Image (spheres, rainbow, N blue to C red):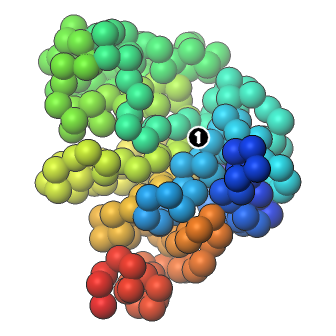
């Protein structure tokens, strides 16, 4: 059963610095939603709020998984992952001195994933054959594109129902960005995932997004109900398309 995510009135920041202000958004079951914004507008901060890395000062974050509603605010990151919510962090955040396979195994610590570890490992290798070829290689010695594949596969090792992906295009050549975005679409469809993707590469993000939000200075400035609405919005045309 596909899962959903709903944020309502989220305010958050660091100390006295307000970064997120009254943000509300929703990701429906089996939907891919893009959170679009240039650097410094609060995308990663919002992801940290969802994952329990940063507690909002106000607002609610609710995930519905297998027909049951869970309030995420106040839960630890471990508890949130254990519910079936995975994160591919900005910059990949791999363990560079561990092998590819060791990084993958570290992604399978939640109880549900541990019981299906071998099947998930085989599935990861089938999805990303290069990872199987290099399973004994140190993660830090891989190319940027290969590391992004590993970060995606590691998140899948937790058997998530909801997948958060933070800036998958960062540090990648244009051709690798396109391949990564295509792979995200493939994984979403194969595993019936609900996906929230934070991205500053507008053109790539809207290729696979069902709809999206534009965040500016920590606030939702526009909600596009489909790719066409995003492409024709004046704010988007100004900041992303240079029109």
Q: Quick check: 203 above or below 104? A: below
Residue hosting label 1: 161
Task: Pick out the residue farthest to the front.
Answer: 16
Which of these two is toward me, 25 or 36? 36
Tell me the crowding category of disc 1: few under 14, some 14 to 19, or many 20 or more residues within 10 angstroms, Cα based: many
Which of these two is toward me, 174 or 122? 174
- Position of residue 139 measured from the top left corner of the image (x, y, whole percent): 27, 18
| Residue at the (38%, 34%) spot, across then down | 92
In the rendered image, which quarter is residue 109 located in? top right
- Position of residue 129 measured from the top left corner of the image (x, y, whole percent): 19, 28
Relative to residue 103, is residue 84 drawn left or right? Answer: right
Q: Quick check: 198 above or below 221? A: above
Relative to residue 111, is residue 70 drawn left or right? Answer: right
- Position of residue 72 measured from the top left corner of the image (x, y, whole percent): 78, 41
Secondary structure at numbered mark 1: loop
Which of the image's four quarters has the C terminus?
bottom left
Asked if one can make out residue 5 in the rendered structure from this viewpoint, the answer is no
Which of these two is toward me, 104 or 48? 48
Q: Quick check: 236 above or below 52? A: below
Asked if one can make out residue 90 in the rendered structure from this viewpoint, the answer is yes
Q: Quick check: 197 above or below 54? A: below
| Residue at the (45%, 31%) spot, across then down | 156
- Position of residue 110 measured from the top left corner of the image (x, y, whole percent): 61, 19
Relative to residue 176, is residue 68 drawn left or right? Answer: right
| Residue at the (63%, 52%) spot, across then down | 46
């Amino acid at each position: 059963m596909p899962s959903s995510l709903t944020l309502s009135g989220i305010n958050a920041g660091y100390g006295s610095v307000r970064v997120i202000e009254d943000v509300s958004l929703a990701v429906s079951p089996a939907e891919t939603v893009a959170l679009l914004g240039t650097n410094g507008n609060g995308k990663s901060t919002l992801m940290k709020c969802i994952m329990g890395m940063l507690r909002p000062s106000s607002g609610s974050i609710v995930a519905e998984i297998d027909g049951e509603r869970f309030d995420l605010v106040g839960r630890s990151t471990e508890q949130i992952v254990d519910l079936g919510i995975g994160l591919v962090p900005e910059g990949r955040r791999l363990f560079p001195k561990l092998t590819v396979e060791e990084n993958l195994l570290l992604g399978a610590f939640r109880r549900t994933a541990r019981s299906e570890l071998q099947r998930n490992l085989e599935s990861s290798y089938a999805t990303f054959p290069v990872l199987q070829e290099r399973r004994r290689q140190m993660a830090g010695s891989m190319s940027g594109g290969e590391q992004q594949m590993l970060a995606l596969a590691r998140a899948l090792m937790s058997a998530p129902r909801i997948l958060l992906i933070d800036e998958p295009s960062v540090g990648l050549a244009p051709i690798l960005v396109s391949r990564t975005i295509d792979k995200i679409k493939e994984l979403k469809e194969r595993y019936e995932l609900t996906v929230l993707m934070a991205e500053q590469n507008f053109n790539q993000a809207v290729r696979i997004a069902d709809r999206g939000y534009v965040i500016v200075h920590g606030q939702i400035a526009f909600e596009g109900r489909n790719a066409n609405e995003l492409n024709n919005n004046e704010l988007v045309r100004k900041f992303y398309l240079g029109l």
